[in-house]
Image (cartoon, rainbow, N blue to C red):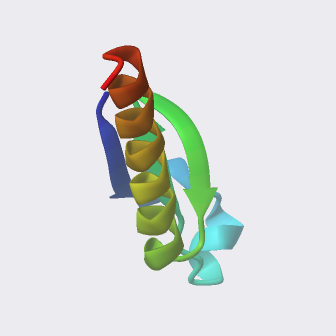
């Protein structure tokens, strides 16, 4: 599964959020939005958690 973290671009932000200087990082798993964070660090932490869970499931599925 692919998990990506991208900063949301201004075209997908409200005018109020842009004026306030708010930044949002989207976390997408298989092109589905699964999380939004105000901190890039938190977004990457969530990405790592999803990848860890995915790895665990794959490991359990192989019976190893």
Residue 44 to residue 53: above or below: below
For the point 47% across and 48% down, which residue is it? Answer: 27
Q: Who's the residue at 59% across and 48% down the image? A: 35
- Residue in front for this viewpoint, 13 or 5: 5
- Percent across and percent down for residue 34 are 57, 39
Residue at the bottom extreme of this rendering: 21
Percent position of residue 50, x then y? 47, 45
Residue situated in front as seen by the camera: 56 or 26: 56
Residue 60 position, x and y percent, is 42, 24
Q: Which image quarter is the N terminus in? A: top left
Query: Residue 55, percent across and down?
Result: 35, 37
Left or right of 48 on screen, residue 64 = left
Q: What residue is drawn where x is 61% and y is 79%?
A: 19
Q: Is residue 40 visible?
A: yes
- Residue at (60, 55) in percent of width and height: 36
Choose between 46 and 27: the one closer to the eye.
46
Extreme-front residue of the structure: 64
Q: Quadrant of residue 30?
A: top left
């Amino acid at each position: 599964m692919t998990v990506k973290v991208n900063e949301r671009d201004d075209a997908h932000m409200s005018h109020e959020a842009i004026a306030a200087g708010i930044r949002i990082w989207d976390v997408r798993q298989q092109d589905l939005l699964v999380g939004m964070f105000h901190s890039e660090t938190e977004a990457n932490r969530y990405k790592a958690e999803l990848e860890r869970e995915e790895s665990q499931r794959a490991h359990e599925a192989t019976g190893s």
